[in-house]
Image (spheres, helix red, strand yellow):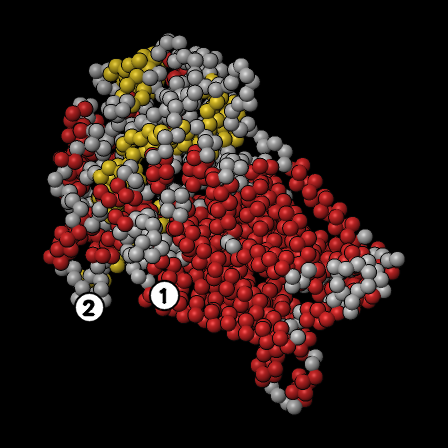
Amino acid sequence: MENSLRPDRGSLGRFVLRRLLLLIPVLFGVTFLTYGLMFLSPSDPVEMMLQAQGIPVTPEVAQAMRVKMGLDRPFLEQYFAWLWRFLSGDMGVSLIDGEPVRQMLMAAAPKTLLLTATSLLVTVALSLPLGILTAVRQNRFSDYLIRFLSFLGNAMPCFLLSLLLLYLFALRLNLLPVLAGGGAKGLILPTLALSLPMSGRYIRQVRAAVLEQLGQRYVSGAISRGVRTRTVLFKSVLRNAMTTILTLLALSMGSLLGGTAAVERIFSWRGMGYMVMDAIFMRDYPVIQAFVVWMTVLYVVINLLTDLSYAIVDPRSRKGLGVQP
Amino acid sequence: MKKRLCLILAALMLLGALSACSPAAPSQTASPGGASKKPKSFVFGVYNFTKIDPSDNYNGWGTLRYGVGETLFKLDDNLNVVPWLALGAGLSEDRLTWTITLRDGVLFHNGNAMDGAAVKASLERLVERNERAASELMIASITAEGNTVSITTAQPNPTLPNALCDPYACIVDASADDGTVDFNLAPVCTGPYKVKSFTPEVEAVLEPFPDYWGGMPALDELVIKSIPDVDTLALAMQNGEIDAAYGLSYDTLSLFSGDDRFSITQAATARVYMLFFNLNRPFMQDPAFRRALCMAVDKDSYGKILLNGAGTPTKSAFPSSLSYGDDALFEDVPDYDPEGARALLLENGYRDTDGDGYLDKGGQKVTLRVVTYTRAGLPQSTQALVSALRDLGIDAAYQQYESISQALQSGDYDLCAYSFVTAPTGDAYAFLSHTMGTGKGGNYGGYSNPQVDALLNQLATEFDVAKRAEYAVQIQKIALADSSYCFMFHLNMFMVMKKGVTGLKQSPVDYYQITAETSPAA
Amino acid sequence: MTRNRRFGRVRLILLLTLAALLCLLCLIGPELAPNDPYKVNLLQAKQPPSEKFPLGTDGFGRCVLSRILVGARTSVFSALLVVGITLTVGCVIGTLCGYFGGAVDTIFMRLVDIFLAFPGMVLALAVAGMLGTGLGNAVIALAATGWPQYARLARSYVLTLREENFVYAARLNGQSTWSILLRHILPNALRPLIVTASLSIGGTILGLAGLSFLGLGALPPAAEWGSMLSDGRGLMQQAPWIVLYPGLTIFLTVVLFNLLGDSVRDALAPADDTHLFRKVRPRFKKKGTPTL
């Protein structure tokens, strides 16, 4: 039935290779920018570091620190030295308490990933069925109701939602503990706080994508030929809308990865967003750099995987350079 | 087929999420309950959870607070030095050697006896690792014999016993610091509780030390939970998820004070909120101007309203429980008098000559940069002050930092609101020297007065307590006569706990919290 | 079909009017404020809504309504500024890349790829963190992370536009490159970009409020909506109006701008052929013979 669309191993492989090669300059650029961020601040990074730790800044102390950190060497040399260290696993130590950044990351990253994964899951679980529903029942009451609610959800700032959820569920209704720790119980409220606004946005996008497919000739053609509506829906429409939906998933990972900071703070969820807020205020550059690089690498990898699955789902896209957001 | 792929992806993610939802590591609160014996567990939520090697920086505060470590002497509610692990101290003729008798039968957590040799090793480890301790103790040599320790100081040090009350002087078994145990996480001390497990920045689970010299501790399990977000801390307390909380914001006092499910223990401490005037800036060099600024500070309202009554207005650096903190002695210091401030400014040539709504003098608009940091109560008081200054016609701008050291080091400010514990060990010298001595580390405003310096030198070596008090008063009088500093109010520190909790009392010395008697509500 | 179109027009005009009113409010807000938004009056702190203070007072005794009105300027205009900057910069760069191609194209598109590689808020957080607190820096941070998507979009449209007949004709006629760019390319490329821009205003307001909430945007005593929320958090139980009203304001403003964005999209880019669909849509309700 679908023989003509079976993936051609060769071209898939070439596609993957091409994408990976293109990745390299991007990753260089990302790390370059991240390292250069440190010099963005109007004041001398070394002075800022010392001040944030409460060490009196004298020219000798500053110079000694500069030499120790290799900051007196030309920028490119610094950058490559840092990159080399970074790639070999040495991400430096926190300027606040001397703890190896790598350890901090290994402790915090799984928590953020967990939160992100469950939020994504819940978003998909909400948006997909509801989006399809509203597309299919277009312009009926359920459509308007769901669209209205999703519209409101989209406009709600997630930090306000977090505060309200915490207050409502923990204090008033007493359904969940405030200090829910790191386990499943503690995941519920932050996940809701993140996924509800996102679902609001994606229900409408799923709806639009499905509607676009439903408007195509082949749908009415199939139906007039007597194919069951449900079959049409799942076999063809969803498949073709999948590319759009996958893109949405990848993009939403982007907003999730960065947007967890406020939510993690409010729910005391000790992930990377939590870790980086302290680092930002204390000018803990190594931590900030590690945070930015890793989040970006993760995002890039996810985009790559999306493009790959996109290529598997729709071989036509292999010619191009992947999804254009 | 594509649908299947997506389903597989979704299933994988779900599996991944579920498997990662493994039970969180350390144990939560108490008691699943067997019908017969319910373990007595206590959960203490704190906002500033640190590691607890006492010789490291200020981490000794945690060691003391959580009932893990103890010092040779402690301070009572009137900030007098009283025996604790030591029974007494005698001073030699030449005032250089202190002979300290230790309490009998004190054991370390690992069973070793705390004798003279152990105390000597502990103190030597301390001065080697902690610069502040070394300079405050001024130890030249220590000898130990049985249950006594003799400390010889490099020069006469009248406040050695006070310094030995400082949390850094928690007595540890230095011989156990050999690499097998991480003293940052589980120091071997003498207190009623010892560390069972310690997860930095998350929580510490402590268990009772059965051979504690003060008797069997009341709890079977003590959990110190780190909750750096004060709103979450308040919510957790309200929800009954913790037995006691330390570090709540003053705003939450009203939440708990009316509620009879909770009780609050509050005490006035020696922590002062004060203003540093940057004496290197143009307008700040005029004493009359500074005086006018002092008159604009509505200490009463800030203490009552902004801090919910937890602030006691003061004129001096020290609380009124101390003789050298008696406000009556400082008549020079002006009261809150906004009209007086206005008049004073006018008198001294500050007027709005160019009609821009702000005062100016000598062609220069009076612009002030007021900075502070985010310690509970400081931003509020400072913002209120800035508003009051603007009412006077001063172009005051407010900026707040997470870490104030930046602004202080660069000197880029006119007024800085800061918080100091002025008598951490019940004595005036440390604070006065640190903040008013020429060139000293805490003298952020650049104050320098040879009279004060001379008095400080005398204070450093004066053994007579009454004389010391006199010097302290004199020093403050000189510094405050020309309004070089402004002390706003002393803070009450407080802890909220469930009704029925016993053995937990807020002390005027902010580092005594958990004791062997601390016990949850029945 | 025409009825739908007309309805869309009416809706667009209505929303544009509302948005304009909002901007007007931002401009004259400070005049409308019943009290001084910065004046600290401790004796009247934490008051519930009353006649003098229609939305109550915050922890310092400052009028919440006045602060919301004054903060409108900060919150809304800053967001509009960010969108304006990203739109302009992105459009210019994208157009130039798309039209001229070559080295310029390669370099800038690599740059765009790099910027797009960063997840949204991550870069904004890092930049705001490095630059320091303050509304200006938050604006710069969000603008720096927002321009790439417009550049990409502009470039892809210009690539297509470049091959259009009327462009060839203009070139044959001897029109200068700049003239072609300004007269033909830019206006056409701008259309879809404006759609994207109007759709992202709401998100930018949320982003700015979010940064301020975290402490990276506007600083006290500035009356920005996001920082009002973070300030009032500690008093949420004792004086909920301090948090609720600014929160509600953010919410309603974002709703307004999202609706506006939708309207603009529907008006300018009716690629949504649902109207077509309605004609041919089979009735899914009934099984059996579909009606056409």
Mark 1 near mark 2, Cβ–Cβ under 8 Å? Answer: no
Does dot 1 land on a helix, a strand or a loop?
A: helix
Res. B67 in view: no
Q: Nearer the viewer, residue A314 or B421?
A: A314
Does dot 2 land on a helix, a strand or a loop?
A: loop
Q: Are the numbered discs 1 and 2 placed on the same chain, yes or no?
A: no
What is the C-alpha distance between the residues marked 1 and 2?
28 Å
Pinpoint residue A150: horizontal percent, then vertical percent.
58, 56
Q: Chain of mark 2?
A: B
Instruction: Please tell me whether residue B443 is drawn above or below residue A209 in the rendered image.
Output: above
Residue sitting at 58 percent across and 37 percent down?
Answer: A185
Q: Which residue is mark 1?
A: C29
Q: Mark number for residue B354? A: 2
Q: Chain of mark 1?
A: C
Q: Nearer the viewer, residue A91 or B387?
A: B387
In this rendering, position of residue B399 left or right of residue A42: left
The quarter of the rendered structure image containing the N terminus of chain C is: bottom right
Give residue C39's quadrant in the image. Answer: bottom left
Res. B74 in view: yes
Q: Mark number for residue B115? A: none
Pinpoint residue B49: horizontal percent, then vertical percent.
44, 33
In this rendering, position of residue A199 left or right of residue A277: right
User: Looking at the image, is mark 1 or mark 2 nearer the viewer?
Assistant: 1
Q: Nearer the viewer, residue B118 or C278?
A: C278
Pinpoint residue A52: horizontal percent, then vertical percent.
41, 45
Task: Name which residue type carries label 2.
Answer: Asp
Residue sitting at 42 percent across and 39 percent down?
Answer: B230
Residue sitting at 12 percent across and 55 percent down?
Answer: B343
Give residue A20's quadrant in the image. Answer: bottom right
Q: Residues within 10 Å of mark 2 (few under 14, many from 20)?
A: few
Q: Residues within 10 Å of mark 1 (few under 14, many from 20)?
A: many
